[in-house]
């Protein structure tokens, strides 16, 4: 399960920050924050519950800002 979570995070976190920054100040801020995030491989050390939450948050924010 952990490797699946890491794989999902790697896919989600590889999006281009430019696609999340169109127009809205919150989206621009989130796009800027995504540039400073650690590599997806670093999430392997996080507990699965946190990794799932991080992936869900990123997916929701990225989807809202597109």
Image (spheres, grey):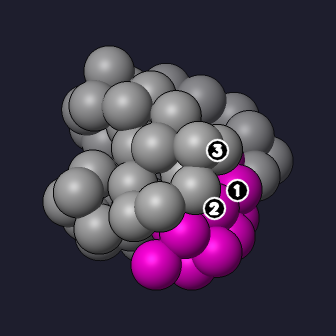
Dot 2 or dot 3: first in sequence order is 3
Dot 1: element: helix
Whether residue 62 is situated above or below residue 29 in the rendered picture: below
**Quadrant of the image occupied by residue 15:** bottom left
Q: Is residue 55 above or below residue 43?
A: below
For the residues labelled 2 and 3, say whether their Cβ atoms are less than 8 Å apart.
no
Q: Magenta region's main secondary structure? A: helix
Q: Which mark is residue 12?
A: none
**Residue 6 visible within the image:** yes
Q: Assign a secondary structure to mark 2.
A: helix
Residue 22 placement (x, y as % from top left): 39, 64
Q: Nearer the viewer, mark 2 or mark 1?
A: 2
Locate the N terminus and report the quarter of the image it occupies: bottom right
Q: Sequence order check: which comes first, mark 3 or mark 1? A: 3
Magenta stretch in the rendered image: 54-66
- The residue beneath circle 3 is 26
Task: Report, in whole angstroms, how far the alpha carbon at label 2 lies from the one at label 3.
Answer: 10 Å
Residue plotted at (31% across, 42% down): 40
């Amino acid at each position: 399960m952990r490797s699946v979570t890491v794989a999902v995070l790697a896919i989600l976190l590889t999006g281009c920050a430019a696609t999340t920054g169109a127009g809205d100040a919150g989206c621009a801020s989130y796009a800027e924050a995504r540039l400073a995030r650690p590599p997806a491989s670093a999430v392997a050390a996080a507990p699965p519950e946190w990794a799932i939450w991080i992936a869900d948050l990123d997916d929701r924010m990225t989807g809202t800002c597109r």
